[in-house]
Amino acid sequence: MLKDKIKSLAKAYKEEVIQNRRHLHSHPELSYQEYETAKFVKSKLEEIGIESLEQKATTGWTALIKGKNPDKKVIALRADMDALPIIEANEVPYKSQNPGVMHACGHDAHTASLLGAAKILNEVKDQFEGTIKLIFQPGEEVAPGGASYMIKDGALNNPRPNGIIGQHVMPFIPAGKVGFRQGIYMASADELYVTVKGKGGHGAMPETLIDPVLIASHMIVALQQVISRAASPKIPSVLSFGRVEALGATNVIPNEVKIQGTFRTLNEEWRAKAHQKMLQIAKGIVEGMGGEVDFEIRKGYPFLQNDPELTARATDAAKEYLGEENVIDLDIWMAAEDFAYYSQEIDGCFYRLGTRNEDKGIVSGVHTPTFDIEEDALEIGAGLMAWLAVAELQKA
């Protein structure tokens, strides 16, 4: 059976996938600066013998693996390549060699897995019908998201996929297991940049001031009404402010306060209404207390929705490959992912690869200095991606 052949190849290529992941982990590059990473990906694809490489969005790549009857159906597989501005705290042989930059979200594992899947698929291309499009994209971590640039640059054209599958590591799922969810899965994400302006001066003479610190405090508290009173309890929403900068002193009130935050939800209609509600509340509070406000909403990724039918088929295929006990149901997650752009264009399935190993102490969450993965999971990372693509092509 083709499934067994893919499993065998995934096992055979496991060490190569691990070494590719370690190389990428040692040489991380920030969003939209993945120049050496792109060269590495290109060289590996050429080694495999894959043709039809096209450069997209400066540091992205697409490539095709054509089986028999290549026009019958097209399925895309996607990996992201960028790293984060984090100082790595792990003491491992493959520790980041680029100071202040770290693969703390597993994109090194995603890229290595897709390279492994590509090698497997290229070796068995005479055993399936259709075409598999590989998408290696930059800039997932930084708005507006590398996926949006890849789409604008034609990554979903010539040929246009019938569907797309993406994989992401999950440190809360044990290695050996994967997770799927049909329908809405991840949130939209908007960045908030607010400046509250007043009149600073000596803290001992408040009657001569318009205190932006006090005003900003009231505004932050009042804005939580957007979630607690304006939002339907049926629509998950999050409003968080993570940075408040008031550069005064113990006895100095500054002229302004700068605030940064994020708003996330799972409904586009409510998202637009919430934006207007935030602006209204901020303006009313700040101006009512004598100040001025600049409230910028930088619209980020849309919510991510997994196509129910494609995801159901992928879940069944994963159960065939790993066993039903190793495939779990996921809950909604209020983090965001620019894979959402693809899922807004074509049928999408974004699933999770378990990478946790408590016995080895591999338990840290993504975006932390101690994040790492159980590398044994990469055998599944490469093999399952390959199998999901082939299984989908086999469906009418």
Image: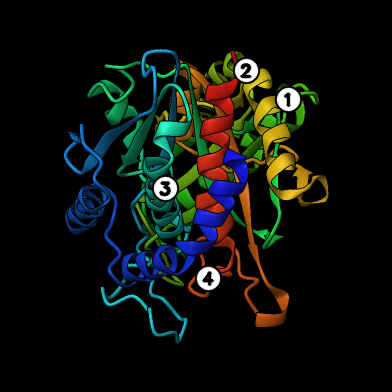
* Vertical placement of residue 26 versus 156, above or below: below
Depth check, mark 4 against mark 1: the one in front is 4
- The residue that appears at 45% across and 47% down in the rendered structure is 260
Label 4: which secondary element: loop
How many labels sit on residues?
4
Q: Quarter holding the C terminus?
A: top right
How far across and down, in percent of the image, does residue 276 sit?
52, 18
Return the mark for residue 372: 4
Query: 10 Å neighbourhood of mark 3: few (<14), some, or many (≥20)?
Result: many
How far across and down, in percent of the image, does residue 45 sit?
26, 48
> Can see residue 218?
no
- Circles 4 and 1, Cβ within 8 Å, touching? The answer is no
Question: In the displayed structure, does residue 306 sit left or right of residue 95?
Answer: right
Question: In the displayed structure, does residue 173 sit left or right of residue 258?
Answer: right
- Circles 2 and 4, Cβ within 8 Å, touching? The answer is no
Query: 10 Å neighbourhood of mark 4: few (<14), some, or many (≥20)?
Result: many
Disc 1 residue type?
Answer: Ile
- Circles 1 and 3, Cβ within 8 Å, touching? The answer is no
Residue linked to disc 1: 235
> Can see residue 9?
yes
Residue linked to disc 3: 114
Query: 10 Å neighbourhood of mark 2: few (<14), some, or many (≥20)?
Result: some
Residue linked to disc 2: 270
